[in-house]
Amino acid sequence: MNTQNLQKNLTLTAIGLLILGLGVAGGVWWTKRNANMAPGSTESAKSERKVLYWYDPMKPDAKFDKPGPSPFMDMQLVARYADEGAADTGALTISTRASQSLGMRVATVLEQDLSSTVEVAGTLQLSERDVSIVQARTSGFVERVYPRAPGDVIAAGSPLADVLNPEWIGAQQEFLAVKTMGDAALIQAARQRLALLGMPPTVIQRVDDSNRTMAVTTITAPTSGVLSELMVRQGMSLSPGMTLARITGLGTVWLELALPQAQASNLAIGQVVEARLTAAPDTVLKGKVTSVLAETNPDTRTLRVRVELPNPGQKLRAGMLATATLYGPTESVLLVPSDAVIRTGKRALVYLAEEGGQFKPVDVQIGAERDGQLVIRQGLSAGQKVVASGQFLLDSEASMRGIVTQPSQPAESMALPAASMDKGAVFETSGVIEELDASNIKLRHQAVPALKWPAMIMGFKRAKDLQSSGFKVGDTVQFQFKATGDEYEVVTLKGAKP
């Protein structure tokens, strides 16, 4: 019985091993069959795809018409196929569901009339253009000083000091003596002499009316304002020209503003300004910019702008704080949300949202920013749609696919159109001959800084008198070219210097 069981087990084991062997053999045969078929299938699929051009992923804006090593990096050029189309059209295609997943928000480019209005804080100061100086007109002695102090606000004609003027007494006596003679000419000459001695007209008139000399005269304030300085004291001796007081008028005051340099582009002398005082926010004072000081504030690097304001009732005082609004010219501008603009430091770009879920990067020139809106100077038009959020993910994807931004002034290629160049201008660079025939020459040339061209492969026409004998494909040459009609033409060709 045991022998029969053993034979049965051996038979089953043999059958299992046979089945396993057949399975392994079949798997090996199938793998080899697929391995032999895959290359052909892949090559067939690749051959069926149309190649648009080759490019360097690190510099996708340079396009080449044949494969090979990149002139920019130590790598091979990558093919761009027609069915990948995004880079050729310069746009990304994203489904609605993907847009929602990315949290993308679209905003419309608006055209609005915008005035260059700037609000800035400032401090009131006394006007240094309205200053009066009180000086001694003759030698004398101060007999009395009226109760005044620096900082007092005084009215015109307010007395400051009583001064004894010995030199005036003799001249007044002569005037009174001539007056008794009745000679009009002599009287006029004597009166004029009193005026030349510095005697005020009011004092001369008093002497004439009273027929008595006036040894003591009162010095008064010529104008109203703040008594900035008072340098006269009782008992002191005076000499001609000595300064006794300084009075600053209050008819107008200065508002000095600290204007950031970035907001000074539209600043102009005579510009209208409205000021609101912190102490009286409901009161609006209108003035104008009278000067922009020659030096900035050394601490804040802000411009010092001086505004002249009226002072009705002389209630404004130096040191008061105010907020000024500077009104500039109004212009029609394009506005987009500030978040829609990607700034790299060297340029600014936005992503246009087009029909069919396509998004295209566009270079723009930006202006001032206000209330979360950014002025677009160039690159967009009113009514276009731009991506206001999620555009950084788009930008990363565009860079990976080699999609380049459209310039704010669109051009069909990296090279300037020949028709737009000066026909007399000749440019020179070096390169390697890629193809050469009787009428054309293709060169892998170095950068042309004058035209802002990078190094690239480009086809040129040959000038009729171009001497190219002795040159062949692969030679390194120095050449000159110029624009002729809509093409570029090589005019000289010579071997490159070693």
Image (cartoon, rainbow, N blue to C red):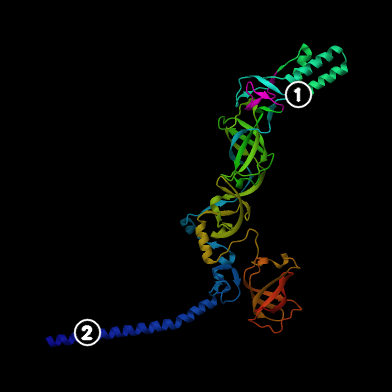
Question: Is residue 219 located in the magenta-colored stretch of the structure?
Answer: yes
Report helix, strand or loop for mark 2: helix
Horizontal relation, residue 468 to residue 112: left or right: right
In this view, 167 is above or below 58 = above
In this view, 159 is above or below 112 = above
Report helix, strand or loop for mark 1: loop
Work out how far the residue at label 2 is from the one at label 1, CA to CA, in angstroms: 146 Å
Indicate the quadrant where residue 387 lies.
Answer: bottom right
Q: Which residue is mark 1?
A: 198
Residue in view at x 55 percent, y 47 percent:
372
Q: Looking at the picture, tell me which residue is in the foreground, 104 or 375.
A: 375
Disc 2 or disc 1, which is closer to the eye? 1
Indicate the quadrant where residue 343 lies.
Answer: bottom right
| Highlighted magenta segment, given as a residue range | 217-240
In this view, 342 is above or below 113 = below
Horizontal relation, residue 383 to residue 483: left or right: left
Q: Looking at the picture, tell me which residue is in the foreground, 445 or 138.
A: 138
Percent position of residue 236, x then y: 64, 23
Instruction: In the rendered structure, find residue 12 and report the number of the disc placed on it.
Output: 2
Horizontal relation, residue 248 to residue 43: left or right: right
Q: Is residue 228 visible?
A: no
**Amino acid type of the residue tagged 1 in the rendering:** Gly
Indicate the quadrant where residue 352 lies.
Answer: bottom right
